[in-house]
Amino acid sequence: MVTRRSIDGVQRMSQQDSARTAPDREEIDAVHRAHVAAVNRGDADAWVNTFAEDGVQMPPHAPANVGREAIRSWARGFCDAFHAQFALSVEEVRTAGDWAFERGAYTIALTAKAGGEPMQETGKYITIYEKRSGGAWKIVRDIWNNDTPPQSPR
């Protein structure tokens, strides 16, 4: 049986979990809720704290940000430039021991802090989590790209 529910701007679709993985799924859900909330608040430090120290963030049209400090630098630049309204629609979460991946779609509206009309974007993402020592789940890899085809040269 597949169920879908909304959690603080995040929709989750899940198979019925075994008793062993249900707590892990709840903790993973908490990490992505924290991620979404931090982006929407413009809180780069809280956003970065969802990542492992050796996490890798792979934004579109940019080099990978390797390590928490590189991610922090990118996130601060993003948060300094934009107000965001961000939401995830989680389509799949799978766990395997201390590893998990999440696949889904996102929507984001970005308004430049310098002014102007909001920019709307939809896309897809994959996030890989690892359960670290102490039992905390952290994002170790995060990649996304938008659904808009590239503009052809004029």
Image: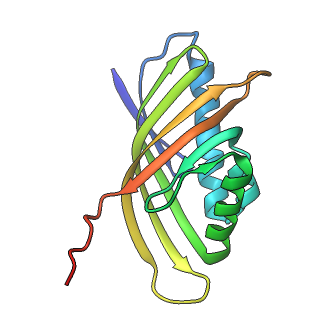
Front residue of 145/14: it is: 145
The quarter of the rendered structure image containing the N terminus is top left
On the image, the x and y values in percent for residue 12 come to: 45, 37
On the image, the x and y values in percent for residue 88 come to: 47, 49
Front residue of 35/144: it is: 144
On the image, the x and y values in percent for residue 139 come to: 62, 38
Front residue of 84/98: it is: 98
Indicate left or right for 25 with 117 as reference: right
The residue lying furthest to the bottom in this view is 115
Residue 54 image-quadrant placement:
top right
The residue lying furthest to the right in this view is 134
Q: Is residue 61 above or below residue 103?
A: below
On the image, the x and y values in percent for residue 33 come to: 61, 45
Front residue of 55/113: it is: 55
The quarter of the rendered structure image containing the C terminus is bottom left
Indicate left or right for 140 with 133 as reference: left
Q: How many marks?
A: 0
Residue at left 41%, top 37%? 103
Q: Is residue 36 above or below residue 77?
A: above
Q: Is residue 101 above or below residue 19?
A: below
